[in-house]
Image (cartoon, rainbow, N blue to C red):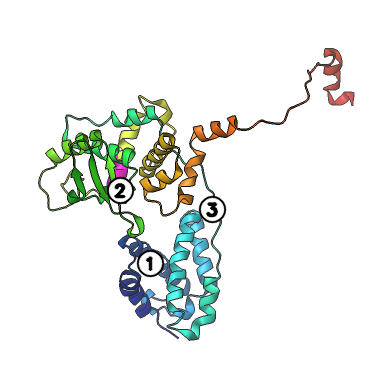
């Protein structure tokens, strides 16, 4: 039997952050996945998590764990696939370290991912953007901060982690523009050149931000770094207020990523070039950006105008006699 504790410790503390240079977010996600897995295995096998052995984490147990998080924790297929990806990464790490368990490892690696639905991306219209940006009070300190965060999210298309992780030295003001150095997903950094109005909103916030030990631009009410959850709370609060003025926001779920989708649609409508959308958002491939073609009505109108549908034979419907139609419409007449 092979104790698993030493291997998972080396995988999470050395292999992921040092050998693979995985991001801090990836390490946290993987750690949480194994926390759930070992808690499930501990209850199922009636042993302490520290006493688990590799041979006990076989394909049937992993499949039972994946079913449990979907049935009891109500995880969606995407979350299920993310947990499975963490487990498969660990099994690949063990493949050459514990060759005696090779057959068991390959059975786990053979577990397929679930197919997921691809819903139509939500985005905000121009009126909805104006209603949302009009909510924060520019006469109050937190109102100035909220306006700057929302405006930067809509115009820059930043992910929520990129927005709250923006640091003071990443912002460079120019006479007519502002340049922002964005630390992107997967260690892919990019530089954004944004409008003077965005620069003015950031300057207004930095003027009242005050001194704080945190290097990040945006702070919470306790003068600490703004978190992802904190920005989500701010966005939900202002969406609820904006919905009083803009009824279309009542049923629309507005998450931080919806602001990013809104920026992408605006760039696509302005340029008509999907490559510029990928460049703006920091996508590695234009294939990732092609989902926004579904949201741009100008693309559909262009396709509609360039095609001629097949013709139908002309004809006109003539209803039958009303009395006979009434009689034929009853079951007892058949």
> Residue 247 placed where, x, y %?
41, 26
Ranked by sequence position, the earlier of labels 2 and 1 is 1
Given this view, does label 1 or label 3 mark the residue nearer the observer? Answer: 3
Secondary structure, mark 3, is loop
Quadrant in the rendering for residue 276: top left
Residue 50 as seen in the image, left or right of residue 147: right
Residue 313 as seen in the image, left or right of residue 181: right
The answer to which of 277 and 92 lies nearer the viewer is 277
Given this view, does label 2 or label 3 mark the residue nearer the observer? Answer: 3
Secondary structure, mark 2, is helix
Residue 333 as seen in the image, left or right of residue 220: right
Residue 35's mark?
Answer: 1
Residue under numbered circle 3 = 116
Residue 40's place in the image compared with 265, above or below, is below
> Residue 216 placed where, x, y %?
19, 50
Which is the main secondary structure of the residues drawn in magenta?
helix
Q: Residues within 10 Å of mark 1 (few under 14, many from 20)?
A: few
Q: Do the residues bearing badges 1 and 3 touch, measured as CB atoms within 8 Å?
A: no
Q: Quadrant of the image for the C terminus?
A: top right
Q: Residue at 53% across / 67% down in the picture?
A: 63
Q: Residue at 77% across / 21% down in the picture?
A: 314
Q: Is residue 219 visible?
A: no
Residue under numbered circle 2 = 229
Residue with the most extreme right position: 334
Q: Is residue 232 magenta?
A: yes
Given this view, does label 2 or label 1 mark the residue nearer the observer? Answer: 2
Residue 286's mark?
Answer: none
Ranked by sequence position, the earlier of labels 1 and 3 is 1
Q: Residues within 10 Å of mark 3 (few under 14, many from 20)?
A: few
């Amino acid at each position: 039997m092979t104790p698993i504790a030493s291997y998972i410790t080396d995988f999470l503390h050395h292999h992921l952050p040092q050998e693979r240079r995985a991001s801090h977010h990836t390490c946290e996600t993987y750690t949480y996945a194994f926390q759930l897995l070992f808690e499930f295995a501990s209850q199922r096998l009636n042993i302490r998590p520290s006493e688990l052995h590799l041979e006990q984490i076989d394909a049937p147990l992993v499949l039972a764990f994946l079913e449990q998080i979907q049935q009891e924790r109500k995880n969606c297929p995407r979350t299920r696939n993310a947990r499975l990806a963490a487990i498969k990464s660990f099994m690949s790490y063990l493949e050459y370290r514990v060759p005696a368990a090779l057959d068991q490892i390959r059975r786990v690696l053979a577990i397929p991912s679930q197919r997921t639905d691809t819903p139509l991306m939500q985005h905000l219209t121009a009126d909805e953007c104006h209603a949302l940006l009009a909510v924060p009070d520019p006469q109050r300190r937190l109102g100035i901060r909220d306006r700057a965060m929302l405006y930067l999210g809509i115009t820059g298309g930043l992910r929520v982690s990129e927005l709250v992780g923006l640091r003071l030295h990443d912002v460079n003001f120019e006479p007519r523009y502002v340049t922002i150095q964005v630390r992107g997903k997967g260690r892919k950094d990019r530089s954004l050149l944004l409008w003077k109005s965005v620069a003015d909103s950031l300057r207004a916030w930095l003027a009242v931000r005050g001194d704080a030990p945190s290097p990040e631009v945006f702070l919470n009410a306790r003068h600490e770094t703004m978190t992802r959850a904190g920005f989500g709370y701010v966005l939900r609060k202002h969406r609820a207020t904006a919905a009083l003025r803009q009824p279309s926001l009542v049923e629309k779920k507005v998450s931080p990523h919806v602001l990013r989708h809104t920026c992408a649609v605006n760039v696509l409508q302005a340029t008509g070039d999907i490559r510029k959308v990928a460049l703006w958002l920091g996508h590695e491939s234009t294939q990732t950006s092609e989902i926004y073609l579904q949201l741009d009505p100008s693309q559909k109108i262009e396709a509609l105008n360039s095609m001629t549908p097949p013709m139908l034979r002309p004809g006109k419907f003539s209803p039958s006699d009303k009395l006979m139609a009434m009689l034929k419409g009853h079951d007892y007449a058949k």
